[in-house]
Image: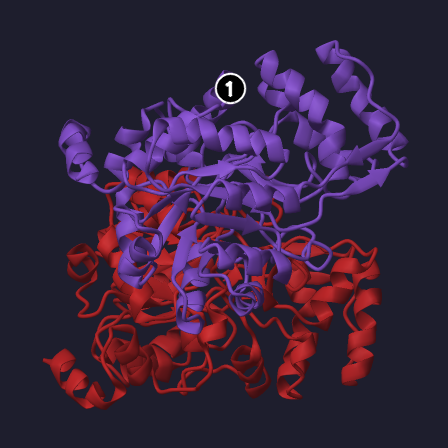
Chain colours: A purple, B red
Amino acid sequence: MGKLLETINLHIPIIQAGMAGGITTPKLVAEVANAGALGTIGAGYMSASSLRNEIQAVKQLTDKPFAVNLFAANLESFSSDVAPMQHFLEKYRNELEIDPGKQSVKVYDYLQEKVYVVIEQDIPVVSTAFGVLSSVLIERLKKNDVKLIGMATNLDEANELVEAGYDIIVAQGFEAGGHRGTFDVNKYPNGCNVGLLSLVQEFLYNLDVPVVAAGGISNNGQIDALLRMGAAGVQLGTKFLVAKEAGTNSAYRRALMKASSVDTVITSAFSGRPARAVFNRFIQEVETSDCEILPFPIQNELTKDIRGAAKEFAVSEFQSLWAGQGVGSIVNEDPVVDILASLIGKDTEETDQLGLELDD
Amino acid sequence: MGKLLETINLHIPIIQAGMAGGITTPKLVAEVANAGALGTIGAGYMSASSLRNEIQAVKQLTDKPFAVNLFAANLESFSSDVAPMQHFLEKYRNELEIDPGKQSVKVYDYLQEKVYVVIEQDIPVVSTAFGVLSSVLIERLKKNDVKLIGMATNLDEANELVEAGYDIIVAQGFEAGGHRGTFDVNKYPNGCNVGLLSLVQEFLYNLDVPVVAAGGISNNGQIDALLRMGAAGVQLGTKFLVAKEAGTNSAYRRALMKASSVDTVITSAFSGRPARAVFNRFIQEVETSDCEILPFPIQNELTKDIRGAAKEFAVSEFQSLWAGQGVGSIVNEDPVVDILASLIGKDTEETDQLGLELDD
């Protein structure tokens, strides 16, 4: 357990997950870092210059270490074969009164450039999902003393990451919100789905690196139990979605505070990659349509304008409401410092004291 | 945690799951009971007279309390509309060289009679799955001081059980082997699937009765963690399938010792009800066929002769190889006393000592 704290120089063995799509504001990341946990910029879809701006904004707010999360997958793709899905999606555009969709889609990949930015900006930790970074990028990061955290959904993936030189493994349980980290979604179309308690046990037994537990974690009792089992730390996403400092829009926040564990499903409807979200009309209709969901990141690109407008107009039914199975415990919006205090088992009244302790 | 031990008078807060289909031999149940944990006769498919015989056989081997597991669902059903599925299943009968299948199916229900046997035989604990016993049966059991354990896969089910008078709730996580306990499989065709750590947390927060954790549990570290979270006990099935005393056939045992967490899937192919099993040819072919799986227990009755012959001929590919996601940790066949010793964190060398302690 001390291994995570030592490796990354934290006071609290908690990682704020690197959620992409505008959730991880500089304020969120900095507040997590200031409290002694690991804040993370969700940079999966960012360009290199956006990432640089984000990093600089976080640095204005903290001098503590924080991480950048990247997709270890080449996003570069082009498709002109999107007519049937675009036709199906037009009804949402009509309802939202936005422009018709494009008939061809191009997605750029900035992974290499973002790795350069990480090094240039002296970021101490990079976490990745969906695969293993190339050996060239890993070597470059390690030469610059960047620690690598890799997400795995089964033991084979974890072993691949460790063999490639990753320092810490996140065991992503079936319960987790957002995208399944599963490397091969052809082999596991719905994601590789092992429950957290089984997965952590398997990783602890088989791996020699620190194991971080992720998926459905929402309170101190669970964290205490996982650390006792031998986990080096825990990673939480959903809990930070309702932090006052997060970039989560109001309709999404309301949906999270209303949902319970049975309301989330794993779906590829939004992005072409399996991910856990609060069930809504968009999922229902895309999954029961005859129209084939396109692969990631094409489907993601196609639904982007719809999701964007739905955010703007506070319509939860057409948004990707990523959430883990711990969502039922989320009933309030709190500042990061209170969330972390409750996660480590301190009353919110003790928060000030905690802040002092942690800042020492 | 003491609540389970007090309520049922156990020394170890571990329940051996009531697996149906010849697994829970009198020797298995008695050995678990003798070690101070809760042995359970899996009586879901038994007739009343078989159950009476089983109970009497267990009583020959122990004077400790043990439980009977029943299906809280009416099995009574008849169907003559089985031709397409029987036609599809003929190829397995041909391969196994057994008689053709029947063209109509009748399943009897002995639930009420089995409840009488439980009372007549002075059994102290009844556990159920798939629903809530009728108020008449619950009243009868409670009048005779029988404690009731109900399995739930979500909070609504748990609340129904508690309101009906159940004393203890088993939180069945997504990881669990065998049938999903889900009450309404029309609403949840693949079972209601919440990961164990999220489900236990939800039940502990919302229920006032003892909560027992079930699903993928395979070692002392996990048990310790769950008890620390506040679980009153744990229930394990898969781990006892490879006990030397269990009725598990040799092909099934070999499959369990070979499988890992990613090899299990939830399927209705065998019984018409979603259940977790090691993936095999039967699941693959039934699920990808055009032939509609019939509802429980009709599908179960149709596949019974095939599963029976496959057991006899040691063919694992046509058996329902129920297993939880902790199956990867199963590599040996051990006596019950050694399994329980390792689950409570004692070395097997200490087993004798443990036996003495527990018998005090």
Residue at point 43%, 44% (across, down): A216
Image position, residue A93 (x, y; %): 76, 16
Does the rendering let one see residue A19? yes
Task: Give the class, few, some or many, for how many residues have Cα within 10 Å of label 1's Cα (few <14, many ≥20).
Answer: some
Q: Which residue is mark 1?
A: A249
State the image quarter where residue B88 is shown. Answer: bottom right
Residue at point 16%, 28% (across, down): A352
Residue at point 30%, 80% (across, down): B30
Q: How many marks?
A: 1
Does the rendering let one see residue B119? no
**For the residue labelled by badge 1, is the local secondary structure a helix, a strand or a loop?**
loop
State the image quarter where residue B5 is shown. Answer: bottom left
* Residue closer to the observer: B127 or A265: A265
Residue at point 22%, 87% (across, down): B351
* Residue closer to the observer: B22 or B354: B354
**Quadrant where the N terminus of chain B lies?**
bottom left
* Residue closer to the observer: B56 or A200: A200
Image position, residue B278 (x, y; %): 60, 70
Image position, residue B37 (x, y; %): 25, 71
Chain of the residue where label 1 is placed in the rendered structure: A
A336 is higher (above) or lower (below) than A74: above
| Residue B303 left/right relative to A232 | right
Q: As shown in the figure, which amino acid type bears the numbered disc 1? A: Asn
State the image quarter where residue B336 is shown. Answer: bottom left
A5 is higher (above) or lower (below) than A84: below
**Quadrant where the C terminus of chain B lies?**
bottom left
| Residue A132 left/right relative to B118 | right
* Residue closer to the observer: B347 or B14: B347
Image position, residue B191 (x, y; %): 56, 49
